[in-house]
Amino acid sequence: MPADAAEEIRGTAHGTAPVPLSVLDLVTVGAGRTASDALRTSVDIVRLAEGRGFERYWVAEHHSMPGVASSSPAVILAHLAAHTDRIRLGSGGVMLPNHAPLVIAEQFGTLEAMAPGRVDLGLGRAPGTDGATAAALRRSDRLNEGADDFPQQLAELIRFLDDDFPDGHPYGRIHAVPGPVQATSPGGVQSAHRPPVWLLGSSGFSARLAGTLGLPFAFAHHFSAQNTVPALDLYRESFRPSAVLDAPYALIGVAALATDDEKEARRQVMAAALNMVRLRTGRPGLVPTPEEAEAYDFSPMEEDFVRSWNANVVHGTADEVRAGLDDLQKRTGADELMLTANAHGGDVRLRSYELIADAYGLPTPA
């Protein structure tokens, strides 16, 4: 990694935000909408995020979920790169056990060539789907093997990204292209720069590994809130300075939805919660409308789940969301907040980021 690697990782806070703000996009598809609609919304949001000073825009890998159209992060990121100039783009994350390390190195080397100096490679250890789908992706039913092999897969991927397998290694003559080998080939003029690697997690495993390797860490607070503080503590305790970072840097993913009216925020998060109820009970589908959620007869067990789920969604008016985010940042000490707005309509999601940007006085486009 180049000497300025830490500068690509450590973001810049704008306005009155306590830390840099970023966006996590699941490319959600609402009932009555199409994947094309969702991808157009992603373009609208990334343009807004870039214009308002959000630090980075990540896309998460999920599979076999009708309401989530982000099965191919690299493809979506290439699309977003064509519509932006400055904002960092990355995966939040690519699920490493689902893919050969060389393929990921090639995909993100290609993205780096498309958007030089503004690509992040966030890597996860989970499959991003159910076991049967993971088996179909990996062409194997030995799923635990992939997760257990994560440190070795990560080391191999980084070797491909840096093009520095040792002499005698079976992959020593294999190169990820685009990549550093082009800079060292006769007549080569390409930069040897490659995307910084982040580790993602919802428990302690990746937190400890990221700390030990001196890598930046992203924690999935938006669906594993009870583990946030322990995981961040473990990351900081385990951290060892590296060529990438001399001190820990941790961001957390936060479910946050701001609306012009508090009542409307509650309606929207109930629809998103119903979507999670269906997902968790093996009935994944498109994100329902608020009207569908209002008419739905939640069982007592489902009501308990919804209360628990929504307790960790920062929602309400812009001022209420700002206060909730400020409090969360203080409680966790997160170095960056990555916001994900889950709602049925793309217009609601876009408006949420606009309201949050206004609440923090983020810069407006010239």
Image: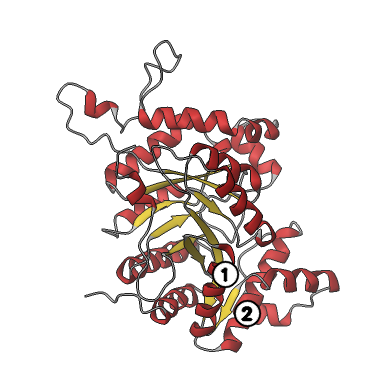
| Residue farthest right in this picture | 300
Q: Judge whether residue 365 can be spotted in this image.
A: yes
Q: Mark 2 or mark 1, which has the lower sequence index?
A: 2
**Amino acid at dot 2:** Pro
For the residue pair 174 and 324, the one nearer the viewer reads as 324
Taking the spot 68% from the left edge, 78% from the top edge, the residue there is 293
Taking the spot 35% from the left edge, 55% from the top edge, the residue there is 88
**Amino acid at dot 1:** Leu
Q: Is residue 151 above or below residue 278?
A: above
Kindly indicate the quadrant of the structure image that contains residue 185: top left
Q: Position of residue 302 (x, y in %)?
A: 79, 70
Q: Is residue 342 above or below residue 224?
A: below
Q: Which mark is residue 56?
A: none
Q: Which mark is residue 328?
A: 1
For the residue pair 44 and 116, the one nearer the viewer reads as 116
Kindly indicate the quadrant of the structure image that contains residue 238: top right
Q: Which mark is residue 290?
A: 2
The kind of secondary structure element at disc 1 is: helix
Task: Mark 2 vs mark 1: give the one in front.
Answer: 1
Taking the spot 55% from the left edge, 65% from the top edge, the residue there is 254
